[in-house]
């Protein structure tokens, strides 16, 4: 378990501050992560990597000459937000383009893709190479769906060396893609990992068993087998990877990676068995690596990665580099300090003219919106443990923590905007931005979009009408479909959001009281009821999206945590409407937690 922390919610910021201070030879802190504290004589393509914290030395430990130029650091096991990624990318850009590279996880893809679009809109040439080395996360015919684990090191090293050599962004991207195409990994675990402040590990492995094909975020393994001897494990790892050989090349780089608590002595013992197995299979081994390169907090586990070399990749893999966690050879050109250690970029300036105080009517709406978000944050804070439990069945168990952090940040931002005299649209916009930035991950990105889209329904001084709210909710559904790339039936929050929108539209068009507050209250209550029922029904579905996709069958029988949390939010909103109109609210929110 993680023993050293103050407030678990501050773990990443506290840790990153210490890392920047201790590693000022290589990095300095910026908003959202760290960037190099040195610069080469000539500008190059900038390699920006990133992902959730909890994997050191991935990702912050791989920033330095010959490797990455910067890393965006998300919360523990949660992708960085788009805002964090943009901050790091702008700090790294040298005018020759930015290459993003990261593990292929839904939240990372959503946020990095959004950052890429924004950079291109600003005139910065941005490209992406996602890492897909984990052989167990999708079949060989769907490699593009595989997730990235310790193969990150290979892709980052090759891309960093190509950038250091002065190659243009098209060549850096091509070589990084080539490295990814020729890299395969397999992971195993003997016990799960525990997040800061958590009482239980994200998953457990029965005594005397070993999980095969686990993910680095605590996703359960694909299978469990009796605990093997060291030679049996070496044979399993080698056989599975060689069966996935991308071509007939006989020159490979083996990387044996510890995931947290497997000791170096054990890793070297195991490598001593892996090495002859590869040589007996006719392979020539080039610059093997044994150590910790992509961890998972205190997980007892390890992974084996093989990079099949060609002439181009061999030169780039052997090229010099220097970082806090991975150094090789001596750099041929000097890299001079760019700033004082620990120096940070200033916070973004707020356009106060665009946020002028609203009218009295709009301010009242803003206070009501803030109250609703505060209620939502309280509900999600109370439900964080249960949402995490649901997520751990087939995912990584962090959904509750992410929703808790995001909603609390949204409530604080909404309260600040209200205190500044802003109206409902500005209050909701601020809340959406804060949720996306602090929540991180897939849920943070999507809820940021949902709230930001709903904000448009509160523009102006008048209270929203049933028809304008229907349009705003429908727009939010379209936004989730487009931004998340999901459809109904794939076991996501959309399976609860669409019934909510459908029932809301039906309810506001039904004959009844013409009073807008009463119509909205009744419609929201009916819609929350529909969302709750639909969320519970997702237990019958097979997960087809996100980190649970690799364990889709395991998810059957458990409702989707994203759909459940949406239903809880819908019920909280219904309660807020009803508190002013004496409309009864359904009780399913409590049932959804059981």
Image (spheres, rainbow, N blue to C red):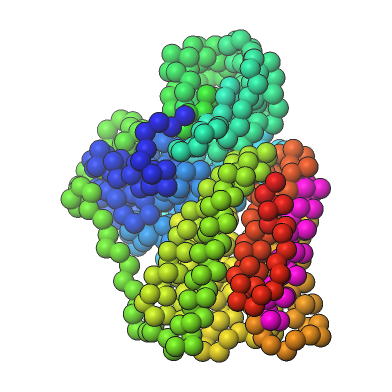
Residue 121 image offset from top left, x and y in percent: 47, 71
Toward which corner of the image does residue 321 lie, by quadrant? Answer: top left
Residue 267, image x, y percentages: 48, 17
Task: Tell me the residue at 75%/70% (across/down).
Answer: 526
Above or below: residue 352 compared with residue 22: below
Asked if residue 149 shows in the view, the reply is no
Q: Residue at x 43, y 32 (%)?
A: 2
Does 405 appear in magenta? no
Residue 269: tell me if it is visible: yes
| Number of numbered labels in the structure image | 0
Q: Which residue ends up furthest to the front in the rendered image? A: 582
Q: Name the residue rendered at 69%, 24% in the picture.
A: 224
- Residue 386 picture quarter: top right
519 drawn magenta? yes
Q: Horizontal placement of 308 versus 38: left or right?
A: right
- Residue extent of the magenta highlight: 518-544
Residue 160 percent across, percent down from the top left: 40, 44
**Residue occupying the point 48% across, 85% down:** 362
In the image, taking residue 55 as reference, residue 466 lies left or right, namely right
Residue 48 position in % (x across, y down):
41, 51
Is 129 above or below relative to 183? below
Instruction: Name the one closer to the observer, 187 or 312.
Output: 187
The secondary structure that most of the magenta stretch takes on is helix
């Amino acid at each position: 378990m993680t023993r050293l922390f103050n407030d678990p919610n501050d773990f990443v910021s506290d840790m990153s501050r210490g890392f920047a201070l201790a590693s000022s030879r290589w990095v300095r802190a910026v908003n959202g992560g760290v960037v190099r504290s040195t610069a080469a004589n000539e500008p190059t393509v900038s390699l920006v990597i990133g992902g959730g914290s909890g994997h050191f030395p991935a990702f912050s430990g791989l920033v330095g000459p010959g490797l990455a130029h910067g890393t965006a650091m998300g919360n523990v096991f949660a992708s960085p937000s788009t805002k964090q990624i943009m901050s790091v990318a702008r700090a790294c850009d040298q005018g020759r383009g930015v290459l993003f590279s990261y593990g292929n996880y839904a939240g990372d893809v959503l946020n990095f893709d959004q950052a890429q679009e924004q950079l291109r809109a600003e005139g910065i040439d941005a490209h992406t190479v996602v890492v897909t080395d984990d052989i167990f996360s999708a079949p060989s015919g769907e490699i593009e769906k595989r997730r990235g684990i310790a193969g990150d090191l290979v892709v980052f090293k090759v891309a960093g060396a190509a950038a250091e050599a002065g190659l243009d962004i098209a060549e850096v991207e091509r070589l990084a893609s080539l490295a990814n195409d020729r890299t395969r990994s397999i992971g195993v675990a003997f016990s799960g990992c525990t997040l800061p402040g958590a009482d239980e590990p994200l998953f457990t492995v029965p005594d005397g068993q070993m999980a095969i094909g686990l993910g680095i975020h605590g996703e359960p393994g694909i299978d469990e087998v009796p605990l093997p001897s060291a030679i049996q494990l070496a044979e399993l790892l080698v056989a599975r990877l060689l069966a996935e050989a991308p071509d007939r090349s006989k020159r490979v780089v083996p990387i044996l990676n510890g995931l947290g608590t497997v000791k170096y002595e054990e890793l070297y013992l195991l490598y001593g068995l892996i090495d002859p197995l590869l040589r007996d299979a006719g392979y020539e081994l080039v610059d093997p690596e044994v150590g910790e390169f992509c961890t998972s907090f205190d997980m007892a586990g390890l992974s084996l990665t093989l990079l099949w070399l060609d002439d181009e990749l061999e030169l780039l893999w052997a090229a010099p580099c220097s970082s806090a966690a991975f150094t090789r050879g001596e750099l041929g050109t000097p890299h001079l300090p760019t700033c004082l250690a620990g120096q940070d970029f200033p916070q973004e300036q707020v356009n106060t003219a665009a946020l002028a105080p609203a009218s009295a009517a709009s301010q009242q709406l803003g206070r009501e919106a803030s109250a609703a978000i505060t209620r939502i944050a309280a509900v999600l804070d109370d439900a964080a443990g249960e949402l995490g439990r649901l997520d751990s069945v087939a995912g990584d168990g962090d959904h509750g923590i992410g929703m808790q952090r995001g909603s609390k940040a949204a409530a604080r931002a909404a309260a600040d905007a209200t205190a500044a005299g802003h109206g409902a649209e500005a209050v909701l916009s601020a809340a959406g931005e804060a949720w996306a930035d602090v929540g991180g991950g897939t849920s943070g990105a999507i809820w940021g979009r949902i709230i930001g889209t709903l904000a448009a329904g509160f523009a102006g001084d008048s209270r929203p009408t049933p028809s304008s709210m229907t349009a705003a909710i429908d727009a939010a559904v379209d936004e989730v479909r487009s931004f998340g790339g999901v459809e109904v039936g794939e076991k996501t929050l959309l399976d609860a959001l669409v019934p909510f929108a459908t029932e809301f539209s039906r309810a506001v068009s039904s004959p009844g009281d013409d009073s807008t507050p009463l119509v909205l209250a009744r419609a929201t209550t009916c819609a929350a009821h529909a969302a709750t029922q639909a969320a519970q029904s997702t237990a019958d579905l097979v997960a087809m999206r996100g980190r649970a996709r690799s364990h889709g069958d395991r998810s059957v029988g458990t409702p989707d945590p994203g759909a459940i949390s949406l239903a809880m939010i819908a019920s909280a909103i219904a309660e807020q409407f009803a508190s002013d109109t004496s409309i009864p609210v359904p009780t399913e929110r409590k049932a959804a937690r059981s």
